[in-house]
Image (cartoon, helix red, strand yellow):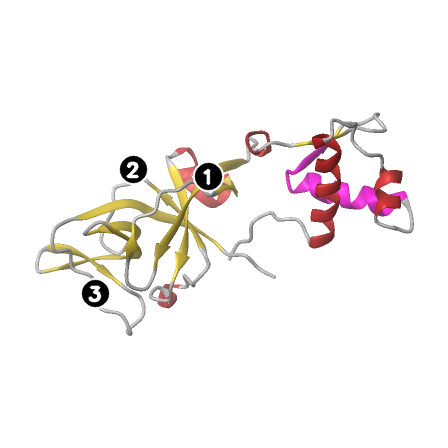
Amino acid sequence: MFSMKEPTQRQGEVLEFIRGAAARGDSAPTYREISKKFDFNSPKAAYDHVVALERKGLVRRQRGKSRGIKLMSLNETASESTVLIPVLGNVAAGGSVEQTQELEGQVQIDRALLGRADKAELFAVHVRGDSMTGCGIFDGDLVVAESKANPRHGDVVVALIDKESTVKTLDEKDGHFVLKPENPRYPVLVPSTELVIQGVVRVLVRRVG
């Protein structure tokens, strides 16, 4: 189980304070100014929050500068050890829903989690529903899929079945591919017209807390 690198509530407030200064065209605040804004006991507390934001790829500290806190863009947060992956809306893990391909943002994933797929064409989708709980995929999870992978029997896939999108296990019935849920409450999905495998799931991301 993995969690996205999101700031805590207080870290988020500090980040918004820094962003506010940038939006006004002001220089980045000092640790003392951050400390005063949030009534911290000392500038050290502000420093610790900024360091935590830096570790999460949201800011960069420029050493030797009193106003050296730099905001990081989405593209800048990627590094040699991480990959930025587009999040393309929701897919069902219940029945199926009409296909949605709206870009909702990006998620940063460690290359080590992706294995050989770290250089592949990847996308992520939010899972809605409980038809895949048997393999550990729950409502609200984010799955990262490889779009040009060669799907095999038993793979968990993001698929378009009769123009509706879903997450299921790829299975076979009477010599044809079908989509199998991992929850006995749901039926196997058999395409009436078409089945398009949009991606093979490689990583599961779960928000914690």
The amino acid on which the numbered mark 1 sits, given as a three-letter code, is Ile
Most extreme residue toward the bottom, as rendered? 185
Q: Position of residue 94 (x, y in %)?
A: 32, 64
> In the rendered image of this protein, does residue 191 appear above or below residue 133?
above
Q: Earlier in the sequence, mark 2 or mark 1?
A: 1
Q: Residue at x 22, y 49 (%)?
A: 163
**113 or 50: nearer the viewer:** 50
Q: How many marks?
A: 3
63 with respect to 198 (left or right): right
149 with respect to 130 (left or right): left
Q: Earlier in the sequence, mark 3 or mark 1?
A: 1
Residue 47 highlighted magenta (yes or no): yes
Which region of the structure is painted magenta? 43-60
Q: Mark 3 and mark 2: span between their CA atoms?
A: 24 Å
Q: Residue at x 28, y 64 (%)?
A: 181
Most extreme residue toward the left, as rendered? 174
Q: Position of residue 112 (x, y in %)?
A: 50, 42
Q: Residues within 10 Å of mark 2 (few under 14, many from 20)?
A: few
Q: In this orientation, does residue 70 appear?
A: no
Q: Position of residue 113 (x, y in %)?
A: 48, 45
Dot in front, 3 or 2? 3
Q: Residues within 10 Å of mark 3 (few under 14, many from 20)?
A: some
Q: Mark 2 and mark 1: span between their CA atoms?
A: 15 Å
The amino acid on which the numbered mark 3 sits, given as a three-letter code, is Val
> In the rendered image of this protein, does residue 17 appear above or below residue 208?
above
Question: Do the residues under discs 3 and 1 have CB atoms within 8 angstroms?
Answer: no
Q: Which residue is mark 3?
A: 188
> In the rendered image of this protein, does residue 55 appear above or below residue 63?
below
Label of residue 85 in the image: 1
